Each structure stands twice: as C-alpha cells, then as structure tokens.
C-alpha cells in the first residue's frame, strides 16, 4: 500500500485520535525542496490513543511519504539528533489548544544549563581535533592533519550551542545561517572559512578561526575548558609575527617617551 501525502493528511485530520501533524525536513525549509524531496511527517497521538489505528503506521516509508507516529508526551522530549528537525518544522494540525506549536517553539531554544554543559563538551572536542590537526601538520603528516581539521568543523558548530540553539544538519547549515545568523558572525565569511578548512586543512585558517571561537567561548563562561589545555593552546593560536630588527626599532621609537 502506497500512501499519498494529501490524502493521508485529510484522513489523519479527521481522525479524533490524532492530536497533531507536524511537517519536517526539506518540505519545511523554504527553498530546499527538490524533485527528490518526500514529505516527512510527525503524526502525534493523544497519550490515551497510543494504541489506536494510526500507531501501526509508525516507520512507514515510501518515495513520497515518511511517517513518525508518536504520542504527545514523547513529542515533548525529542531525541537530541531530532531536535533541529523539530525546531524548524511546520505545524499542520494542532488539536491541543496550541500545545503542539508551543512544543515546537520550545525545542528550538536550549535551556541555559543544558547549553552550558553541551557547549563545554563540544568546545573541548573542538580544541582536541584542532590541536591534533595542527600537531600533525607540524610533524609532517598532512593527511592526518587534514582529516582532523575536517573533524573539528563538526564540533566547531558548538557556536549554535553558545547561542542556545540546536545544531543544524549539514544539509541546512547555509540555509540556517542565511535566515538566522549567529550573533557576532558574518554568515558568508563563516561558511567560506568552514569550506576552506574542510577542503584544505589549512593550519592558518584554523588558527584564525580559533581566535574568534576562543573569544566567544570565554565570553560565554568557558575559560576553564580552554585553560585546561595549558601550553597546548599556543599551538592552536596563530603565532605572533617575529619583528625584524628595523621593525623592532620602529616599534620602540613609537612608544610614549621615546623618539624625537
């Protein structure tokens, strides 16, 4: 049996056991639909109707329609990997006096404690991958350095956690930054840097980016995570240029109380 999206929505809307219908995926992201896009749909049942007829359709998949059948109680607690999908979904039916819509809105905002705890873990993982990348390049192992650089980018998206937002899937990263920029970051420049690091593993690009991430992380209260790396931070940071003798003399002459 192959289900049609429009027909299924009509039938589900008429079913009293269905408390809500929520569209997710590319169909819920304006401009992201292609000829290959299917309809990904949450079918939310009243908690008392968990064993009703629509429950048997949980996990249904076809080329045009994928269904996740859940209860209102479970929908309130999305799995971590499903959080972004829920946060950017579209509510089609809400028979719960707006509760389904409120759950979707709340999913897009991490709690302060949750964001801080998750941000600390992601920051440490990002620093670890960055450190390994720079060290491998230094030690003459560019392949390992490149792979570690690419791995670091996944953890780098802790920037969304610092903004108390769920991290977008890679498919929607540019879409998300275009419509909902990260505070203090220019979206196009950030995407260009991420693309450059993943394509080349370039150390200087990683170190320049780390300087900004470090400042943002410290401002968010994560100094302890960074300081725990001790002198290894020096490898992650961009080295300060060494002044030539004439540059050093010019710098000294420019100090207050010196020169003519």
Image (cartoon, helix red, strand yellow):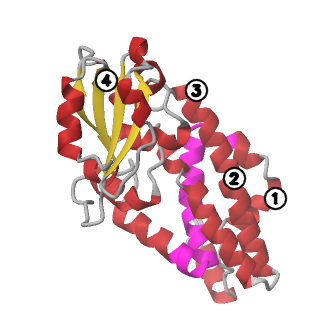
Q: Residue at x 46, y 60 (%)?
A: 170
Q: Residue at x 69, y 53 (%)?
A: 125
Q: Of tags 4 and 2, which is closer to the observer?
A: 4
Q: Label 3 to label 2, Cα distance in Å?
A: 19 Å
10 Å neighbourhood of mark 3: few (<14), some, or many (≥20)?
Answer: few
How many numbered dots are placed on residues in this image?
4
10 Å neighbourhood of mark 1: few (<14), some, or many (≥20)?
Answer: few
Upstream in sequence: badge 4 or badge 2: 4
Q: Residue at x 58, y 26 (%)?
A: 113
Q: Label 3 to label 4, Cα distance in Å?
A: 24 Å
Mainly helix, strand or loop, the magenta region?
A: helix
Chain part drawn in magenta: 196-223
Secondary structure of the residue carrying tag 3 is helix
Q: Label 4 to label 2, Cα distance in Å?
A: 34 Å
Question: What residue is shown with label 3?
Answer: 113
The image position of residue 69, as x and y in percent, is: 41, 32
Q: Which mark is residue 125?
A: 2
Q: Which mark is residue 100?
A: 4
Question: What residue is shown with label 1?
Answer: 231
């Amino acid at each position: 049996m192959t289900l049609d999206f429009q027909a299924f929505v009509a039938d589900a809307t008429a079913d009293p056991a269905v408390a809500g219908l929520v569209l997710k995926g590319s169909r819920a992201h304006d401009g992201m639909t292609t000829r290959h896009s299917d309809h990904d749909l949450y079918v939310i049942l009243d908690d008392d109707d968990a064993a009703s007829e629509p429950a048997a359709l949980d996990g249904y998949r076809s080329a045009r329609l994928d269904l996740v059948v859940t209860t209102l109680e479970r929908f309130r607690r999305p799995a971590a990997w499903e959080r972004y999908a829920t946060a950017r979904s579209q509510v089609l039916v809400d028979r719960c006096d707006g509760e389904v819509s409120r759950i979707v809105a709340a999913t897009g905002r991490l709690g302060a404690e949750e964001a801080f705890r998750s941000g600390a873990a992601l920051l440490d993982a990002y620093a670890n991958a960055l450190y390994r990348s720079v060290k491998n390049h230094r030690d003459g192992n560019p392949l390992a350095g490149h792979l570690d650089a690419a791995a670091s980018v996944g953890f780098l998206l802790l920037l969304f956690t610092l903004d108390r937002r769920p991290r977008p899937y890679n498919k929607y990263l540019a879409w998300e930054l275009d419509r909902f920029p990260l505070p203090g970051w220019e979206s196009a420049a950030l995407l260009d840097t991420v693309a450059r690091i993943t394509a080349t593993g370039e150390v200087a690009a990683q170190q320049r980016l780390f300087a900004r991430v470090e400042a943002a992380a410290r401002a968010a209260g994560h100094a302890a995570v960074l300081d725990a790396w001790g002198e290894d931070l020096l490898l992650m940071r961009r080295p300060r240029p060494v002044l030539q003798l004439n540059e050093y003399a010019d710098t000294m002459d420019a100090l207050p109380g010196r020169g003519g």
